[in-house]
Amino acid sequence: MANPGPMTPQAPFEPSQPPVIEGFSPSVFSNPEGFKEKFIRKTRENPMVPIGCLGTAAALTYGLYCFHRGQSQRSQLMMRTRIAAQGFTVAAILVGLAMSALKSKSGP
């Protein structure tokens, strides 16, 4: 049986502490973001998504109001407008993802 090379003594494993991995930082931000700060940052990064969400909610609300009042033609128009606003929102999300992917690929 071959004798393995000299072993270097390692520090004992401490289960109460996270393992130290070279080049890895468990926290990206020095201070955790709250909901408000994250919402503002994400809105600044891609302002079309909240606009699309508000348009979708407005068209849905007005369409339901028209449906309740018996204005079926306007209700149908608002439901179609809602679908268009949802499509706009999904497209804005995809464009934002593509932009952030290209930004991270090109470097800081």
Image: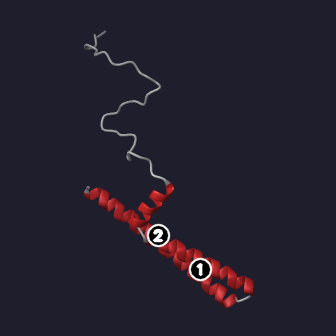
Task: Check the picture and name the quadrant holding the N terminus.
Answer: top left
Element under disc 1 = helix
In the figure, residue 3 lies in which quadrant?
A: top left
Q: How many marks?
A: 2
Answer left or right for 92 relative to 78: left
Answer left or right for 97 relative to 65: left
**Colouring scheme applied when the structure was drawn:** secondary structure
The residue type indicated by label 2 comes to Val
Which residue is located at x 30 percent, y 38 percent? 23
> Toward the viewer: 62 or 31?
31
In the figure, residue 72 lies in which quadrant?
A: bottom right
Classed neighbour count for the residue bearing mark 1: other residues with Cα under 10 Å, few (<14), some (14–19), many (≥20): many
Task: Check the picture and name the quadrant holding the C terminus.
Answer: bottom left
Residue denoted by label 1:
59
> Toward the viewer: 28 or 105?
28
Classed neighbour count for the residue bearing mark 2: other residues with Cα under 10 Å, few (<14), some (14–19), many (≥20): many
Instruction: Find the distance from the CA under tag 1 to the CA under tag 2.
Output: 15 Å
Element under disc 2 = helix
Residue 90's mark?
none
Upstream in the sequence, badge 1 or badge 2? 2
Residue denoted by label 2:
49
The residue type indicated by label 1 comes to Ala
> Toward the viewer: 37 or 98?
37
Q: Is residue 73 above or below residue 82?
A: below
Which residue is located at x 28 percent, y 16 percent? 8
> Toward the viewer: 44 or 64?
44
Rendered location of residue 52, percent (x, y)? 50, 74
Rendered location of residue 49, percent (x, y)? 47, 70
**Labelled pair 1, 2 in contact (Cβ < 8 Å):** no
Rendered location of residue 14, percent (x, y)? 43, 22
Which residue is located at x 35 percent, y 19 percent? 11
